[in-house]
Image: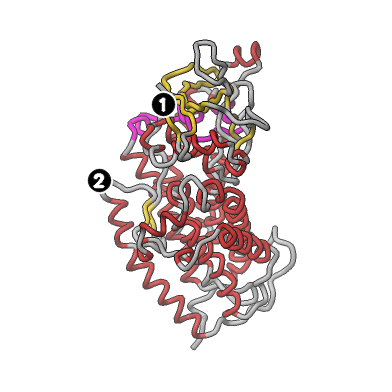
Amino acid sequence: MTWEWFTDPDYWASRLLFQRMLAAIYLVAFVCAARQFRPLLGERGITPIPRFVAATPFRAAPSIFYLRYSDRLFATVAWTGAALSAALLLGLADSAPVWLSMLLWAVPWVLYLSIVNVGQVWYGFGWESLLAEAGFLAIFLGPADTAPPVLVLWLLRWLLFRVEFGAGMIKMRGDRCWRDLTCLYYHHETQPMPGPLSWYFHHLPKPLHKVEVLANHFAQLVVPFALFAPQPVASVAAGVVIVTQGWLMLSGNFAWLNALTITLAVPVLDGRLVERVLPGSRPELTEPPGWQLVLVVALTVLVTVLSYRPVRNLVARRQLMNYSFTSLRLVNTYGAFGGITRRRHEVIIEGTDDPEITPGTVWREYEFKGKPGDPRRRPPQVAPYHLRLDWMLWFVGISTHYGRTWLPGLVAKLLAGDRATLRLLRRDPFPGSLPTFVRARLFTYRFTTARERRETGAWWVRDPGPTIVRPCRLSPDGTPEPVA
């Protein structure tokens, strides 16, 4: 059986660059998991995995941690995934036999899916499912010395289409400001985690903000269809996606969402263009074995069948955003920022070591690594790293409903001076001691004006708001106990 109709050697460099970039994102994701799981999901974490797997059937969240869980095993899984991702980044699978290459790409997919499926609220982000879906398709691409299978390349285009078009449609069906072109009057200031340049983006002239929104609509509602066009149109469409996502990377911190979307655009690029910038030259490519053809055709049929519900969702009046229709997260629906908040409400957690609360009690603030706190601190660059606790506190600022299952546990950890939890923070206001009381308040934040910035050196102006967690002390059973 010939592979002439099922492979395209001209996409050799595009595939290779895609695999390298995907391996780099896998590496970041596994390192994030290894460094943050213990206080969030560990045996003594805020939402422990053992408790989750005991209450959730395996078929709803397949994971190797249903066989057994320990913090040591989780760390082994995460660091193994990181090591294998680093090896793939360095070209471990390039000259491997096809079966071994597929196995090497299947292992990080299984390991990361196992983490995501037990990750609960900490892993409820669209880029987690996106990485799982992209990682599954990558299994079937084959090593660098075989010709790339065309069907898999088209499935990657289909994934990129759903990411971009889904995001565009959720905006057009969502907040009115996307239709009147005013959403970016607010978004750079109220987004989950502003970056070092977000203050400058926010202060761009309003007409330019409207141009930004128009460009976004064009990139997400028109350009995705051109991904399926012949070259060079498809490469131009991929270039628009790359530029747009790069703009988003500059304007804020969205973990690895933008980097992964750029990665998905790479295999759309004409490989002859990519070869000009990659070191080395194309090797003598061999035809993949016939059994790989069978698997690729089966994969295409599977994705086609599973695409029914995501397609129906795209045209539905009540479009779901970032939803997985299967527990293996194979063909998902995507979208982002269907609604834009107009004011930024930031959760500020404070503690005191006073023995009793009085009108003169001095409260000291816990400082987080990424989210706004000290108004004089410039928003840091965090992405592609994902600070999960900081992100979840942004959701609590929108509605305390988002913190009902885990915020009390965080307060208890701070009262107990839990070292693993404190390592998630930038600054502990009680080094070497424990607070007697902890509380959480909402503050309204806004970016300083240019004049305020010059006069005060601050990036933010904030005003205190309501208390959302009353002052608590640690009860004998280890839970936070509100005081009158």
Q: Earlier in the sequence, mark 1 or mark 2?
A: 2
| Residue annotated with mark 1 | 468
Location of residue 23 by image quarter: bottom right
Query: Where in the figure is residue 382, as x and y percent of width and height?
Result: 61, 40
Of 236 and 120, which appears nearest the observer? 120
Question: What span is colored magenta in the figure?
Answer: 175-201
Query: Which type of secondary structure does the marked residue at label 2 adopt?
Result: loop
- Horizontally, residue 85 falls left or right of residue 122, namely right
**In the figure, 14 relative to 217: above or below?**
below
Query: Which type of secondary structure does the marked residue at label 1 adopt?
Result: strand
Query: Where in the figure is residue 274, as x and y percent of width and height?
Result: 64, 60
- Horizontally, residue 186 falls left or right of residue 73, namely left
Q: Quadrant of the C terminus?
A: top left
Residue extending furthest toward the right? 280
Real-space Cα distance between discs 1 and 2? 35 Å
Of 90 and 365, which appears nearest the observer? 365
Structural crowding at the residue carrying mark 1, measured as other residues with C-alpha within 10 Å and reported as few (<14), some (14–19) or many (≥20) = some
The residue sitting at 55% across, 51% down in the picture is 37
| Residue annotated with mark 2 | 317
The colouring scheme, among rainbow, by chain, secondary structure or one colour, is secondary structure
